[in-house]
Amino acid sequence: MYVNPEENLEQSFHLFEYVIYDEFHAYREFELSGILTQIALFQNMSACKVILSSATPKKEIIELLNLVRIGKERHAPIIENIFATPCSMEEGEIIRYQTKVEFHQGKILENIKDIADVLHKVIGELKPGSPQILFIFDTVKDSNLFFTRLFKEYPEIYKYAEKDNGYDTNQIGDIPDFTKPILVSTNKSEVGLDYPIKMLFMEDGFSIDSFVQRFGRAARHEPANCYIYTKKEANPIFTDEIVAYHTFLEKMSYITGEFNIQTKSVRTLFTFRQAIAIEKYVHRKDDLRAYFAVDTGYSYKLWLNFFILLNKYNNGGLSNPNLKRLKLLIDDIKDACKSLRGRSLRHPVIYTRGHEIRQTMYDLLSVLNRVSAVVERTTEGFIIREVESEETGPFISAIKLPYFPDLMDYQKRREQFNEKIETIAKKAVDVFPEKQQGFLLACIRSLYYSIEPDHIILPDEIILWNRKVISLSEDAMDDN
C-alpha cells in the first residue's frame, strides 16, 4: 500500500469510508506487519473505519493493533469488539445445525475405498446446482491426487466432482463448475464458502483455527455428516454420544493444537516496513514519521540508523565479500517487505486435472519440492511440467543462494538460513568499531528471527533429489 509511484495515496484514501480485512485470523507474522502498515496509513490519511472480521479471532492480533498510532496526539485506535454468542431460537437465527461426526486417524487418501463406498450410497440423492459434499485436504498435492484417482478408479463418482484449490485459482481454461454436487478443495475452502454442505470429509488442518473454519463449512443450512481424518487418535477423548459445539471444539484443540502469533516478530517487521517507506519517499518523510509514530522499544528510527550505518561502510570502497553478501541480503529483505507476502518465483505449471491437462501459475519452489516435475526453458521463461513418479518427495535437496558461499539444505532451510546469516554477519561487521558491531548484529539477529526464509529466498540454483541442477535466471516477481 505504501509503495506509490503516482504519489496520490492521500487523495485516494479520502474516497474510502470503510476498509475491511476479512478472515484476519489467517494472517501470519509477515503479512500482519504489512496489514498494520496499511492500517496506520488508512487511519492517518483518511477518516475511514477499519473492520477486521473472523470467526476465530486471535487476541494477539487485536493487541497488536495498539502499535498503530493516530493523529497529532499519537493515540492508539479505538477498538470495538463484537462477539457472536449462543442464544435461543427466539433471540436469533440458526447458524449451525446438528452434525454427526465420525473420526478416522490418517489421511483421506489412505481411506479412499471406504469413502467411495459411502459416496456410492448417497450419489443417487445428489442434485445439481451447488456443492453438497465437500472434501478439504491439508495439501494441494493430495487434493490433486485424489481428484485424479477419482477419474481413474471411480469414474461414476468423478462425473459429479469438481476441484478448486490453489492450483486452480490461476488456471487457463474453463473456471470450476460449482454446480456439481461434489467439491474437492484445500484450506482455500476454509473461508468464504457458504454452500449447503450436508457431507464433509476433512483433514484436521494445522491448528484449531484451521479446524474450526473447516468444520464450519458443514451444517450451515441443514444437519450434516462429517468424517474427520486426524493426525492423532481422537475417538478416546469423546465418551458421550452427544456433545455441545463449544465442548467439541475445546476437546479438539488437544488434538489439533494451537499456534500463537509471535508478537515480537510482528513488531520488528512492522517497524522495518516503516523505515523502508521513509527511506524510499524522502520528500514525504515528515508525514510518514508522523504516521508511524514512535512507540516504546523498536521503532523505525532503529532501522533507519541501521540502514545508514550499513550503507556508509558499504560505500566506502572496503574489500569485504561478507559485507557485500550481507548488504545483498538486507536489500532482498527490503524488497520482500515491499509486498504483503514477500517474494516468489511464479511460473507456468502444466499439470493433470482429472481427465484434463491444464496450465496454471504457481510458485516454482513449492511445486518442485512437492511433486515430481521437470523444468523446461523456453523463450518466454521457465515452464514446469508435472510427471508421474513413484517417488513421494520432498524433491528439492539443496539450493544455492547469492549470500552464502556453499549450498543450503532445503529441508532444513530455517535453521541453516539463520546459522549462515550469523556466520557471514559476524565476518561482515569486523570492519566496524566494536560498539557499532554489537548494534548491527543485534539488528540482523532481530530480522532473521522474525522472518521466514520462504518470504525472501530466490535461489540461483536448485538441486533436486536426483542431483539434477536447475539454474535460474533473474526473473523473479513479487507476490503482491
Image (cartoon, helix red, strand yellow):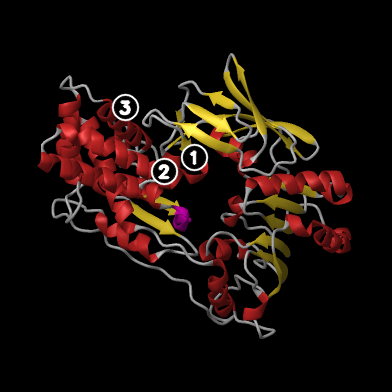
Picture quadrant where residue 25 is located: bottom left
CA–CA distance between discs 3 and 2? 37 Å
Q: Amino acid at mark 3?
A: Pro
Q: Amino acid at mark 2?
A: Gln
Based on the picture, tell me whether residue 271 belongs to the magenta stretch.
no
Residue 147 percent location from the top left of the image: 76, 46
Residue 474 percent location from the top left of the image: 45, 22
Tell me the element at label 2.
helix
The residue beneath circle 2 is 416
Residue sitting at x 30%, y 35%? 424
Q: Amino acid at mark 1?
A: Asp
Residue 174 percent location from the top left of the image: 71, 34
Label number found at residue 5: 3
128 left or right of 22 in image: right
What span is in magenta?
22-27
Q: Earlier in the sequence, mark 3 or mark 2?
A: 3
Q: Are marks 3 and 2 in contact (CB under 8 Å)?
A: no
Q: Are marks 2 and 1 in contact (CB under 8 Å)?
A: yes
Q: Quadrant of the C terminus?
A: top left
